Amino acid sequence: MKLNMPQTNINTTSGFDAAELNFEDFKKIVINDYRIGFESRQAALLGRREVLTGKAKFGIFGDGKEVAQLAMAKAFKPGDWRAGYYRDQTFMFATGMSTLKEFFAQLYAHPDIEKDPASGGRQMNCHYATRFIDSDGNWVNQADTMNCASDISTTGGHMPRLLGLAYASKLYRQNPELHYLRQFSVTGNEVAFGTIGNGSTSEGLFMEAFNAAGVLQVPMAISVWDDAYAISVPARLQTTKEDISEILKGFQREDGTNGYEIFKVRGWDYVALCETYSKAIEVCRTQHVPVLIHVTEMTQPQGHSTSGSHERYKSKERLAWETEHDCLLQMRNWMVSSAIATEQELDALEEQAKKHVRDCQREAWNELAGEIKGELNEAAELIEDLAQQSVSYEKLQEVAAELKACVDPGRRDIVAAVRKALRITVKETLNAKQGLISWMNYENEKNAERFNSRLFTNTRFSPLNVPVNAPRYNPQAKMVDGREVLNACFDANFGRDKTIVAFGEDVGNIGDVNQGFAGLQAKYGDLRITDTGIREATIIGQGMGLAMRGLRPIAEIQYLDYLLYAMTVLSDDLASLSYRTHGGQKAPLIIRTRGHRLEGIWHSGSPMGMILNSMRGIHVCVPRNMTQAAGMYNTLLRGDEPAIVIESLNGYRLKEKLPDNPGEFTVPLGKAEIMRSGTDITVVSYGSTLRIVLEAAEELEQMGISIEVIDPQTLYPFDREKLCVASLHKTSKLLIVDEDIPGGGSAYILQKILEQQNGYYQLDAQPRTLSAKEHRPPYGSDGDYFSKPSLDDVIEVAYQMMNEANPEKYPAIY
Ligand SMILES: Cc1ncc(C[n+]2csc(CCOP(=O)(O)OP(=O)(O)O)c2C)c(N)n1
Ligand SMILES: [Mg+2]
């Protein structure tokens, strides 16, 4: 009998094929699995203690879910992906994607990617990720490694991304033009594994992703860890019939239909779990059929998290049932009764495992504590030096003594002590002060890297580094509808780069509602230009997953007002990806949408404040016309960071000159442009209102008022060359015009110019903003006129500003 598997690895689990395995080998694998599960349980128990004794702040663990995860790990292969939630520590240990020591490093928030590769100390414990780009931004070979997309705390929030990770395999399999990209996929043989708690299947995002995967037929394997609770709320109040696989039965595929394979298995039954995962993942991987594995009868030995105890809401009977059905206990009993191991052997294994976990915990703690101790000693010494020279000797000695007496000190204790010492000596000139300040500046730089860096991946592939390339026009350049400029841009890019895909509602067959993609599906095929269902959140997730796997998606949200339905994914997942992995993951997704004024309450929105306030980590482009939009797409498609481009809804049919190089010219991000020079007022505006401002400038000119009009072009980044403040040097007056609500996008711009660019010091009049009304714009032209800034409004506000400055020259109009 030969061993049809890799050599048993002592750290990770191994798959087995019972027919090929002798009993001794089989035993070894099972015992090794039990050890991994038991160590994981010990980590959870010890982790909770570390929180309760104050060494860590919060803990949430995977105890009670170990055995299913051992089985899932057996089916997980290099090239595969996980997108899951905070219960998956056993799976991560069993696959080797994480270690016990890293588990504790994250629990202690060790801000170092060497210690906590998942997040560099930024995420709560059990929030996992593998680093799939290096520090230069290069992709690692994803086909050879096991991959874990970075977890988020919002339950169900990862489901849209899971869809995209699975969808990438479909594209890699079905589009032969992508087969050369072997560092990302081996012809789509990868499965995207998702995990979710039973309670979180109540989230809309779960249902949306579930349906979409059934339509798309992608290799997505969802495991529901069902412990019958969601914190304190029982299944009865969560799920119809208290049974998620029961109610999803309609998704089961039948002869001649698409759909799912659905499995249900108990979470303490090792053998059944191994069989189920083997079978489920086989069909998922080979046939690209999505599967649901509903794992029932799971438990929570320590309750939900360190925030409370489950004795408060679980009955005695339930607690007793959980004790009896503890999956590791059940596995152990089965091992003994099946002569896989004796009680004594398992006792010995458990003793050894406990010690090993303890050792890993201590090492992780000592490494962080050691670093901090070193810094603390340096700071305390410098404060004592300062005390020697200061009139506040005693106070400073006290600060140093308090610092040295700190139990389990953190970096904030050290920096806070140093800042206090500097405040105490604020009125003294002392030699020792400079040493302390230099030390603090040096440490603050390191702390900024630890805690505040990598909102964007910021590597050489950043769109900010894409070379600037001007549009070229030949003398006979045609004037065309704006949408045709975009169409030419997309066509050229699709021809140039086979990894680019675009999808969204009505994007495929008709080439989007404004025909930017018209004709391109016929030319490039429906795998590249694709219609989707009405499901904004998972359109974004679909794009995010593709972007993480080396493709270049353009995900379209039909109208800006519908972005709300995708905000959770944009804000929680996409925008935070680089930050929460400390630059270890990227998803260069481009979101294409259109907005600003058109017609009616849900087609005229310009919620720029909403976007700017919730999506830091995504570039925000607001092109004034389609040529600028095309240039931005050309830039973004050559960079590797996420961005949203908001085209002006009412601009598609305006005539623009068609450049000769529509797929090549670039518009740099953060480059503002002076649209018109003037001397009296600096007016900053973007998108649709910019046209109104330019029109107003003509009439104002006739009234003797000269305005300088600046288009920032992108709101984030904003005017990197500080043209706005330079303009204020000339005009000393600032007016911002947009069509968001008052205090929305315009307040953001105001902060940028007045505070960041120091524009405040140039003003000789109150800065003004002119925006839309607080309500949404009503339908019809009158609704628009009385709700959005009009030509008349712009002229009058600008005039009022001049009237305030010089009422004699500019008497009030009315
Ligand atoms: C979107 C969102 N809503 C609420 C929470 C708060 N929360 C954290 S865990 C949890 C319960 C989740 O239950 P379940 O999905 O069954 O997973 P379990 O913890 O039981 O494994 C809740 C409500 C959250 N993290 N995210
Ligand atoms: Mg639950």
Image (cartoon, grey):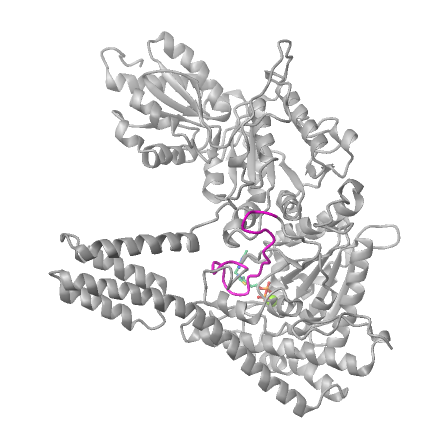
Residue 193, how many percent across, how many down? 69, 59
* Residue 289 is at least partly visible in this image: yes
Q: Is residue 371 magenta?
A: no
From the viewer's side, name the closer residue of 804 and 503: 503
Up-down relation of residue 216 to residue 800 (above or below): below
Q: Is residue 123 magenta?
A: yes
**Which of the 4 image quadrants contains residue 241?**
bottom right
Q: Which residue appears farthest toward the bottom when viewing the image?
A: 344
Residue drawn at (61%, 55%), measured in percent from left and top? 149
Q: Which residue appears farthest toward the left when viewing the image?
A: 391
**Which of the 4 image quadrants contains residue 65?**
bottom right
Q: Is residue 717 left or right of residue 494?
A: left
Highlighted magenta segment, given as a residue range:
118-138
Residue drawn at (71%, 47%), measured in percent from left and top? 168
Ligand 2 falls in quadrant: bottom right
Q: Is residue 220 left or right of residue 693?
A: right
Residue 451, how many percent across, how many down? 42, 54
* Residue 734 is at least partly visible in this image: no
From the viewer's side, name the closer residue of 577 and 773: 577
Up-down relation of residue 731 to residue 610 (above or below): above
From the viewer's side, name the closer residue of 283 and 632: 632
Q: Quick one: quadrant of the N terminus? A: bottom right
Up-down relation of residue 100 to residue 648 (above or below): below
**Which of the 4 image quadrants contains residue 267?**
bottom right
Magenta stretch: dominant SS? loop
Residue 266, how many percent across, how many down? 72, 73
- Number of numbered markers: 0
From the viewer's side, name the closer residue of 633 and 328: 633
Q: Quick one: quadrant of the C terminus? A: top left
Residue 576, how many percent across, how many down? 52, 49
Residue drawn at (52%, 24%), measured in percent from left and top? 624
